[in-house]
Amino acid sequence: MNPWRNIWTIAKRELGAYFTSPVAYVFIVIFLLLCGFFTFFVGGFFERGEASLGQPFFDWHPWFYLFLVPAVGMRLWADERRVGTLELLLTMPVTPWQAIFGKFLASWLFLGLALLFTFPVVLTANYLGHPDNGVIFAAYVGSWLMAGAYLAISCITSAITRSQVVSFILSLVVCLFLILAGYPPVINFLEQFASGGWVDMITSFSVMTHFGGFQKGVLDSRDILFFLSVIGFSLFTTSVILRTYRAG
């Protein structure tokens, strides 16, 4: 059977599971409310006097995803283990990799849909001024890639535990490290105790460092490769974990 057909079948199953429960709608509503509130009230979009979404809108995405993406990803494998359907899924005529990528793809598309629903913010910026839509597009690409990296990490934590709560906490801690590693106050603190080379190495693992280029409208291959590498490594680790269950 065509492997891509297997992947798409699993992805459609997962997408359907999202929208047959209130989880998807609650997530999207919360995400949109947070984006609107922090952009227009906390971020001071109107007070800035410029039609730019870099700081008032996209600056908050790493923090929104810190809580919301683990909430989406925590059920991917933990729920399968809890209800006992993981063994059934792994005995079906699909490889573990196809199952992993199919479930990941469904959740990533769901996150992309939630991100797409923020288009009124872009329309507002264009109505009030003349923003550089190329920069906005690049920032959206970076935001979606960052969400995918968070989600792939959540796949690992979901695969190692039956508890969705434990998976949520573990992925939140890992993703928080990826934020703080490039957060200016943390960088200034590290510079007091470590040489510049060590600080640069630590910050190279930060989503803030790599997402910053997208916010400026730069589609740097190094930044794209970083997020894709995090996704690839995390999904590979998930496959190793699930193979141990299959072997057992």
Image (spheres, helix red, strand yellow):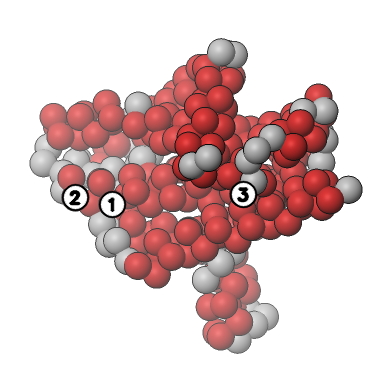
Say if mark 1 contacts mark 2, CB within 8 Å.
yes
Nearest the camera: 103 or 61? 103
The label on residue 97 is: 3
- At a point 56% along the width and 13% down the height, the residue shown is 20
What residue is disc 2 on? Answer: 134
**Residue 153 at what x, y percent from top left?**
63, 50
Nearest the camera: 53 or 1? 1
As drawn, 105 above or below 222: above
The label on residue 138 is: 1
As measured in the structure, the alpha-carbon distance from the residue carrying label 1 to the one carrying label 3 is: 30 Å
Quarter of the figure with residue 233: bottom right
**Residue 102 at what x, y percent from top left?**
55, 39
Say if mark 2 contacts mark 3, CB within 8 Å.
no
Is 203 on the left-hand or right-hand side of 123? right
Quarter of the figure with residue 18: top right
Mark 1 or mark 3: which comes first in sequence?
A: 3
